[in-house]
Image: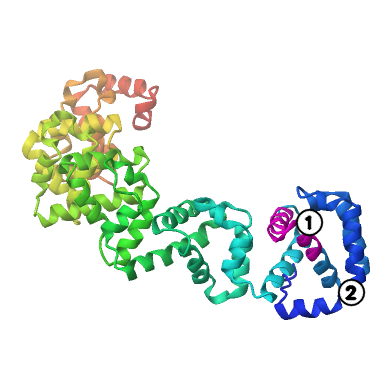
Amino acid sequence: MTARKRISAYGVAKIVEKLTPDKQKAANKLFTQLKLHETTFDLFKGPNFQTWVKSVTKSYTKTPDAANAVIVSTIAARHGDEALARMLVAAKEASTTRRFATQLEEIQLANWLASKQTADDVFKLLKLDDEGVKLFKDPVFTTWVSYATKLDGNKSDALMFSVLKARYDDDVLANMFIVAKETRSTQKIAAKQETLLLAKWADDGKTADEAFKLLNLDTKTDDFLKSPALDSWESYVKLLGEDPFKLILATLTARYTDEGLARMLVVATKDHIPRYVVVGLEGALFNKWQDQEKSVESVFKLLNLNKAGDKILESPMLRTWASYVTKLDTKKPYEAMFSVLKTRYGDEVLTNMLIVAAKSGSTNYHVTRLEGVLLKTWVSDGKTADDIFKLLRLDKDGDQLFESPAFDMWVSYVTKLEGQNPDKLMLSVLKTHYKSGKLENMIIAAQNVPDTKTFAV
């Protein structure tokens, strides 16, 4: 693929020298005869246009740039620069006319450059003044961007921003950039423009609260947490060297108790609030609790987990509590949680709760970790495989032994005790509780049940 040819103002002047009045008149005459002056929609697709282009090109076989210059000047004279620019943008969308339209656009941009048009002049010429917040969606916006880049390649973003800020208030600009960032084709340039706007706010001495209001985030509901403008505000607050989520937390604290806020964050991702917002706010909330020296036990109560009864391991607040405890004690968080739970429920009730929760599959990760602490406690206490068999009341389950929810926990414990050969130890315990014939029948029956087949085999 060859590089796109760029034509300078000097290049245009050299091309103009090659143009002859008689050939220009001939091009104008044929343009009128073919009634191309009456066509603006899909001009480039019409057969008459192709006929005209071939005629003009034939007149300048040795200087194709001159032919393109005649084509541009003729269309611009009849339809205007703005209409021509729109035609060229549309023509660039089609593979059959893209290359030709690109060449003509280069001529048009070079013409403006040669006539010393400013970025502001071309903005007006393309009638972009009328677009408002939809500016970035206008097809000829890209033409203006190309011209600004041609005017000042190294500082084109600043040049464009100077034109925009002279026309729009800060809140309108902010909204314009936020909307444009949601479209892939304009995302990059909108992000650069937003960066310049935020820098302007910082230079103007705008506070985080003033920016919050400019971005229309100061609503009385929590909908602002879903707003794409929150991302822009976060960027500005970081530019000021502040913690955005600490400031948001201060706003929400006026509306919620800590427990209410924690509950809101639990369901936030289901409520279409971005995950980075949820994580940021949860982190700010945990930092606040740490500053207040809230213990594992106190946050347990704050989250009302002390009122959850035997359903505590199914509570969505368990994850929040576990996350906070992990922040407090990075080495042994589940040991700290287990200690609180054991004190409140006792060994037997807590064990049964873990068995039920593990079987249901709810909060699986936390239940598995807590179960691991329980098993380590039994090992430390010197509990044998038979001790735990009885403690879990598996000796009372009879023929239903392999279907008991507690059986899996016992298997896990025996495996922890005898990592190399747990089956031998399990079998020896089972033989002390069941006669060999009955045990054999139980194992055969278990092989036909999907949930117990793996062990029985």
Residue 427 in sight from this viewpoint: no
The kind of residue on which mark 2 rests is Thr
Q: Is residue 398 left or right of residue 340?
A: right
The kind of residue on which mark 1 rests is Thr
Q: Which residue is mark 1?
A: 97
Marks 1/2: CA–CA distance: 27 Å
Residue located 26% across and 36% down the image: 411
Q: Nearer the viewer, mark 1 or mark 2?
A: 2
Q: Residues within 10 Å of mark 1 (few under 14, many from 20)?
A: some
Q: Which quadrant would the N terminus be assigned to in this image? A: bottom right
x and y percentages locating residue 268 in the rendered image: 31, 41
- Queried whether the magenta region covers residue 1, the answer comes back as no
Q: Give the answer, above or below, for where 171 lies relative to 148.
A: above
**Does dot 2 land on a helix, a strand or a loop?**
loop
What is the quadrant of residue 356 in the picture?
top left
x and y percentages locating residue 330 in the rendered image: 20, 56
The residue stretch that appears in magenta: 72-92
Residue located 18% across and 37% down the image: 385
**Does dot 1 land on a helix, a strand or a loop?**
loop
Q: Nearer the viewer, residue 126 or 200?
A: 126
x and y percentages locating residue 335 in the rendered image: 15, 48
x and y percentages locating residue 303 in the rendered image: 15, 40
Residue 313 in sight from this viewpoint: yes
Q: Nearer the viewer, residue 19 or 178?
A: 19
Q: Is residue 193 left or right of residue 140?
A: left
- Queried whether the magenta region covers residue 83, the answer comes back as yes
Q: Is residue 237 left or right of residue 117?
A: left
Q: Which residue is mark 2?
A: 20
